[in-house]
Amino acid sequence: MAAFVVTSGVTRLPAGRRPSSCAPDAGRCGGGSRSSDALTGACASPPRCRRAATLGRSGWVAGVPTGGPAGAAAKSARRTRRSPPTCTAAEPPSSAPPPATPPPSSSKVDLHVGRGNSIEVEGRSISFDYWPGTEAYPTVVYLPGFFYARSRTAKANALEIFCKRRAQPFLVQEYSGVGRSEGSFAEGTLTRWMGECVAILDAVIPPGGKAVLVGSGIGGWMALHVAQMRPDIVVGLVGVSADPDFTEDLLRPALTAAQKETLETDGQLVLQWGFRDYVLSKALMEDAKKWCVMGGGDASLDVRVPVRLIHGLADEEVPPERALLLARVLASDDVSVRLIKGGDHTLETDADFGMMWGAVCEICDAYFEYDLRSPMSG
């Protein structure tokens, strides 16, 4: 299968070629032997040089972002499928932000290592899982898709395993009205769920700590706004089948007159979309209008951190062209879009998990390069 890569502000180097800025003893990524389990071969430690390595179903395309004006270039690769790379690298720079134990929690936060954490937000107990890790790493924060409980989220399970293997902090929440969190799903809105996410970040991420947001579906939409709400914390985004503005651009135009009447009179509607049935509420549809981002034109969305978008060409819910439009709307110069041939909306194969983790590693590489510019970074 093929993975098509579209990048912005990125120069790609031939596979195996080392950027001149890398130290001779810096870590390198290489493909492992073919394996049916893509949850093997996680990166061992933060790299000392920046490598924009793109993992697709077809393998790795190595390169290094160089900045410059935003642009777009499309490439396709057809190689033997490989498992995620095994990275060996030197220790993280000493100037990386310190961090890692949460600040003293208030009486409204129940924080411990592992599953079953909770925080009270506007009178509702919101559940999340949290594992601390190595201080230098940004915390990987997973924002699930629409109505997905933690127990039903394979992407979260994959990220948890990847993060534990290299002692990287990991956090995943459950929105109010979903899973173990209190509240009514019918009353759930982007405003409410994003507020819960920000509250968790403020409670868990220590002073000076950073986070990489990984958002699936509606989680990818919310990540765009959370990054703007907490620019001092968020250092990068990974969107997996992200669907910003789907309520207005995709769902609302598809509703029949009868469905619109049901939504208006009953306050909610069960809608078959793609291969699933979704419960849409009037509250969600109305609230989402004020969070739409796709209609502002090129570079209109003030997100300036590195962004990686992963989308299946066979997505039955969100057309892949939406990922390309989002890339244009983003103000960041460091944006990559990975289009997966045959990939559906869920993107839950081993190769898909490997691509998601590769994007996380790539953003962490970009974050650590900042430390190389300081006089005390070795």
Image: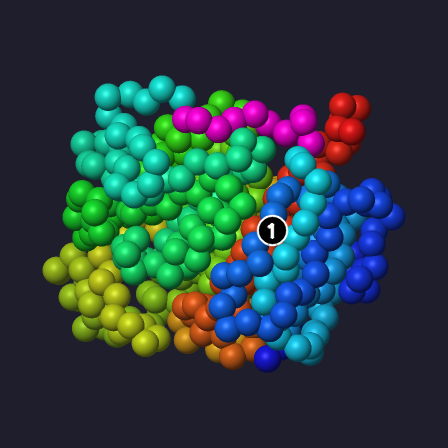
102 on left or right of 208: left
Outermost residue, right side: 20
**Residue 249 rendering spot, x and y as whole percentages:** 42, 64
Residue placed most toward the observer, 347 or 184? 347
Q: Is residue 99 left or right of residue 179?
A: right
Q: Residue at x 32, y 38 (%)?
A: 196
Image height check: is 275 above or below 139?
below
User: Going by the image, does 212 lie left or right of 4?
Assistant: left
Colouring of the image = rainbow
- At x 18%, y 32%, the residue is 123
Name of the residue lying farthest toward the left = 266
Q: Of 70 and 257, which appears nearest the observer?
A: 70
What residue is shown at x 16% (from left), y 66% (from top)? 262
Q: Which residues are magenta?
A: 93-102
Of residues 350 and 218, the one drawn nearer to the viewer in this rendering: 350
Amino acid on which disc 1 is placed: Cys
Residue at point 71%, 40% (across, down)? 90
Q: Quadrant of the C terminus?
A: top right
Depicted 164 relative to depicted 84: above or below: above
Q: Residue at label 1?
A: 43
Residue 177 lies in the magenta-colored region:
no
* Residue 7 in view in this figure: no
Q: Do we see residue 360 in this rendering?
A: yes
Magenta: main secondary structure: loop
Quadrant of the rendering where the N terminus is positioned: bottom right
**Neighbour tally class for label 1: few under 14, some 14-19, many 20 plus, Cα within 10 Å:** many
Q: Position of residue 310 (x, y in %)?
A: 54, 63
